[in-house]
Image (cartoon, grey):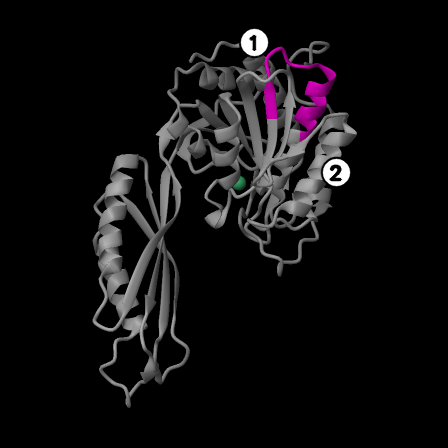
Amino acid sequence: MRTDTGPGPADDAAVERVVGDALELAAIGAPTGDEGARGAAVAERLARLGLDPQQDAVGNVVVRLGDAGPALVVTAHLDTVFGPEIPLEPRRDGDRLLGPGIGDDTVAVAALLELARALREAPPVRPVVLAATVGEEGLGDLRGAKHLLASVPARALVALEGHLLDDLVVGGIGALRLRARYRGPGGHSWGDRGTGSAAHALLRAGAAALDAVPRGAHINVGVVRSGSTVNAIAEEGELLVDLRDDDDGRLRRTAQRVRDALERAPRGVHATVEQVGHRPAGRTPGDHPLVTTARTARAAVGLPPAREDAGSTECNAAYPLGVPAICVGITRGGDMHRTSEWVAIPPIAAGLGALLELVRRLDAAELGG
Ligand SMILES: [Zn+2]
């Protein structure tokens, strides 16, 4: 691919195609777990390029270029954090694109389409699999990326994130999510006094869970729900807890301690705790050809060296499988996960150019076993 021209920022026509696709796709709602309409729009665009996209069992839209061997897998996630109640109305304003999910991750899905177009014009030597994935955000638990990597043998994974142009994500912060539920008999706050309360159980268990986390590990109690009114003993309660650590072993040990704390409930109240997600921690070494090639590709299009750091991306699905993985960005922006989200248009030229250059170089690179 791009054998006709040397490396450099993408041309204006390519940037305009990305902008157009990003605006059209961002207008189609894609809450985690309900990505079908946006997935269909992506599949339609891939088919228009003369490719043969397939929808897999979990809803990823997948297209393979080349034979059935281990592939370079490139992903961008379809889903956003915005539910069906959020008006989308993406728009262009001067040098910016605005709208919920425009950067995370719609502009990256649009860049994936532009990559598909480039690979269609100049086919890669080794197999490449492009996938618009489901279930990256919220409690999606990387459902799409996990399923994809379980079904497609991969040489390496390159995940795309719209906002992260100045970053090269080479590691994954592990995340483990727990849901605790409390159920009691309820009753009148005075008439039934002494009866076990789901709200009281939840508060005590939640406080014990916060105390159970060792130094260096991180807990966020993201959701607390309980009770119906002030003078009733709460019948139900629910806590959603997010644990993070860059060491997967320590993450699991912390999770066990938190779990033990959450399972304690007074007489009359029943506690159940379940794991509702696990993004394993991991890292691709800085001297791995995948990482060094990403550095070279940036330099080739004139981008400054990236901040190399760990994050929480689809790469987390690759580490437990021993698949080298990085996450690269397409542009810069702000207000991620807010309805005021925006991305800048001018940097897309460099971000897209670096992506095309990265894939071209990885096509020729030995990535090891
Ligand atoms: Zn994202």
- Tell me which residue sits at (43%, 12%) in the image: 368
Residue 348 percent coordinates (x, y): 64, 31
Residue 304 percent coordinates (x, y): 52, 22
Question: Does 335 sit left or right of 106 as displayed?
Answer: left
Q: Secondary structure at mark 2?
A: helix
Q: Which residues are magenta?
A: 113-129
**Residue 94 in view (yes/no):** no
Crowding at label 1, few (<14), some or many (≥20) Cα neighbours within 10 Å? few
Question: Does 311 sit left or right of 249 as displayed?
Answer: right
Q: Secondary structure at mark 1?
A: helix
Crowding at label 2, few (<14), some or many (≥20) Cα neighbours within 10 Å? some
- Tell me which residue sits at (31%, 85%) in the image: 189
Q: How many marks on residues? A: 2
Name the residue nearer the viewer: 174 or 135.
135
Q: Is residue 316 above or below residue 353?
A: below
Q: Quadrant of residue 52?
A: top right
**Residue 311 in view (yes/no):** yes
Residue, disc 2: 20
Residue 180 percent coordinates (x, y): 34, 59
Name the kind of residue labelled 1 in the image. Answer: Ala
- Tell me which residue sits at (31%, 71%) in the image: 198
Cα distance, mark 2 to mark 1? 31 Å
Q: Is residue 8 magenta?
A: no
- Tell me which residue sits at (21%, 46%) in the image: 214
